[in-house]
Image: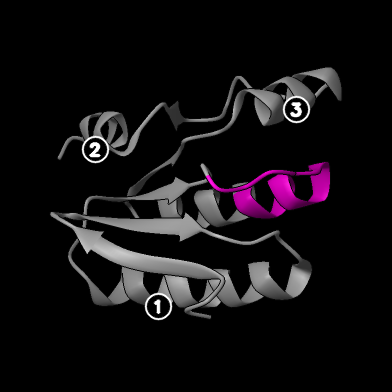
Amino acid sequence: MAKSISISRLRHVLVATVQIDLSSEVLDNFRADLLDKVREHAIKGVLIDLSEVKTLDRMDMDALLEIVTTVEVMGRGCAFVGIRPGIAMALVNIGYETENLHCARSIDDGLEMIGN
């Protein structure tokens, strides 16, 4: 897990940095690891850093949004940071509903969004 998605704590926020292409196995492991850490730590929210992700399809995005929803149901804020312009454009082009995505340009902007 450490080689695929690292999860670290920055102030009162967990920052999950995605460093490899996503697959269902990677996403399942990430979900379990992240939710364990959210439960264990007194945090305000989670930032999912996608700045290293080069491709993202609808299934990957759906799985990420399920993780976000679960974190929010647990009473924490959650936002994506660092989405590349090409990925943003691809999501719009395939008709993905982007209105409900909480996104920030950088980790600093994400921290501000979560209220840290």
| Residue drawn at point x = 78 percent, y = 26 percent | 90
- Would you place residue 4 above or below residue 113 in this image? below
Q: Is residue 48 visible?
A: yes
Three-letter amino acid code at the position of disc 1? Asp
Badge 2 amino acid: Leu
Residues at badges 1 and 3 in contact (C-beta under 8 Å)?
A: no
Mark 1 = which residue? 36
Residues at marks 2 and 1, CA–CA distance in whole angstroms: 21 Å
Residue 101, quarter of the rendered image: top right
Of 41 and 107, nearer the camera is: 107
Quadrant containing the C terminus in the rendered view: top left
- Disc 1 versus disc 3: nearer the observer: 3
Front residue (pair 41, 7): 7
Question: For mark 3, what is the residue?
Answer: 91
Q: Badge 2, how many Cα within 10 Å: few under 14, some, many 20+?
A: many
Circle 1 Cα neighbour tier, 10 Å, few/some/many (<14 / 14–19 / ≥20): few
Residue 96 in percent (x, y) is at: 77, 27
Q: Secondary structure at mark 3?
A: helix
Residue 94: mark: none
Vertical comparison of 8 with 54: above or below = below
Residue visible at 27% across and 77% down in the picture: 40
Q: Which residue is mark 2?
A: 111
Q: Residue furthest right?
A: 94
Query: Which region is colored magenta?
Result: 52-64
Say left or right for 100 vs 110: right
Hey, which quadrant is residue 110 in on the image?
Answer: top left
Residue 74, can we see it? no
